[in-house]
Image: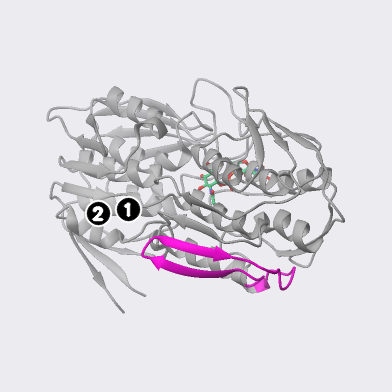
Amino acid sequence: MSYYVIEGGKPLKGRVRVAGAKNAATKQIVASLLTGEDVVLSNVPRIGDTDVTLNVCKSIGLNYKWQDTTTLKLSTPKILTPEVPLAFSGINRIPILLLGPLLHRYGKAIIPMLGGCDIGERPVDFHVQALEKLGAQIVYQEGRYYAVADKLHGTMIELPYPSVGATENILLSSVLAQGRTVIKNAAIEPEVIDLVMMLQKMGAIIFVDTDRTIEIEGVDELYGAAHTVINDRIEAASFAVAGVITGGDVIVEGAEQHHMLTFLNKLRQIGANFEVLDKGIRFYHPGGALKPIALETDVHPGFMTDWQQPLVMLMTQIEGLSVVHETVYEKRFGYTEDLKRMGAEIQLYKTCLGEKSCRFKSLDHAHSCVIKGSTPLHAADITIPDLRAGFSYLIAAAVAKGVSKVRGIQYVERGYSNILNKFQSLDANMRLVEE
Ligand code: EPU
């Protein structure tokens, strides 16, 4: 397996351009299945998860062509089969989102069990219950969900938690349903809103209220459309931290202030500098000491769970005690073990170390942590456990004294395009070793 070799200790300086958001583009590829007409998506990231999603959709009838490096032409004149092959089980979270398009266009769907990073249980009970309320009959048997529906019909669905995936699944299932669907306690992440915008261009009628209510008025048909995927706010925040933590100065082209308000507030509390430019944001270390902070992850507009890992990395380099309460996933600190081997001092806690108690309060999950900085990191041979931890490992290696080997790089390649080139363009001492 290939791995990266990184010699740390060099300030990262220069410009990088973030790609389109993985968590928007993949859902929009699925949305194209709702029409037989052509859909053109621009700013699509060239990453492993895009390829997996294209292959999942191709298996049921999608035709696609890359028109240039980031523009996709998609068309599904006919659904060829309602069954997503079992081979796609366990790879990513996309297959469950095919329920709606398949039920509308075929009356039937067979979906293999889901995958994704090992960061918690990640059940799909909200998805299944919502689809049942919309009129689908679903049974689970031997690793597959079997769903049938003559016609989905509008209904009221109150989500127990503002799940991104469940909200998207309901959107994809209700736009062509008969009548009106109301989602209460919906997720309103920018990636969800970007899906709403694409669906509206395709002919859907969707109202988004200020109180997490989304109302969908079903239409009879959707049409072809062209849409540009929003930029990746996770990649943007990750490069921001890479610049600050190495004492460098990085312009992240495509970083969008309105999608990163909470992240920028936290950076300011820490004392790191940023400057909003016309086409991006410049991030840099001000010199002198940064300040420790307390941080709680949450659903949008809170601090994203996917920004947590780079921030924890930054906290290891700040003098004093920083505290993080992870409230979205119950198992998202697994990666801290390797950081500890590199010299970080991080203690995990099962209690809620935050302003509020979260869903994991009385469960047995280590979902809070205290980071004692500043600790010099030393190089190590580390293996990436999941996608977002992966970027933090690259940052850790870029900060650590000596030469680190970072393995498990297929995880980062699933979610970040041209990651090696981007680090190299910031003058990182990083190379790929192919084995
Ligand atoms: N949940 C349930 N039941 C469900 C659905 C969710 O209990 O039926 C729980 C989950 O277990 C979790 C919480 O609700 O504790 C939030 O899950 P959500 O459904 O919002 O997450 P997701 O749709 O599976 C997406 C992103 C994640 C991102 C989260 C939160 C994709 C493909 N994934 O996951 O991104 O962290 O929203 O914003 O869009 C990543 O990109 O690396 C990643 C993990």
Q: Quadrant of residue 435?
A: bottom left
Does the magenta-highlighted stretch encompass residue 363? no
Residue drawn at 75 percent across, 42 percent down? 218
* Residue 285 pos. (x, y %): 17, 34
Q: Is residue 425 left or right of residue 368?
A: left
* Residue 26 pos. (x, y %): 53, 56
Above or below, 61 relative to 325: below
Which kind of residue does numbered mark 1 sit on? Tyr
* Residue 189 pos. (x, y %): 52, 36
Determine the quadrant in which ligand 1 lies: top right
Location of mark 2 (residue): 397
Q: Is residue 202 visible?
A: yes
Residue placed farthest to the top in the image?
355
- Please tell me the numbered disc located at residue 177: none
Q: Is residue 104 left or right of residue 372?
A: right
Quarter holding the N terminus? bottom left
Q: Quadrant of residue 253?
A: top left
Q: Secondary structure at mark 2?
A: helix
Q: Nearer the viewer, residue 283 or 397?
A: 283
* Residue 399 pos. (x, y %): 20, 48
Q: Is residue 260 left or right of residue 38?
A: left
> Are the residues flagged by discs 1 and 2 in contact, CB closer than 8 Å?
yes
Q: Give the class, few, some or many, for how many residues have Cα within 10 Å of label 1's Cα (few <14, many ≥20).
A: many
Above or below, 336 relative to 63: above
- Please tell me the numbered disc located at residue 393: 1
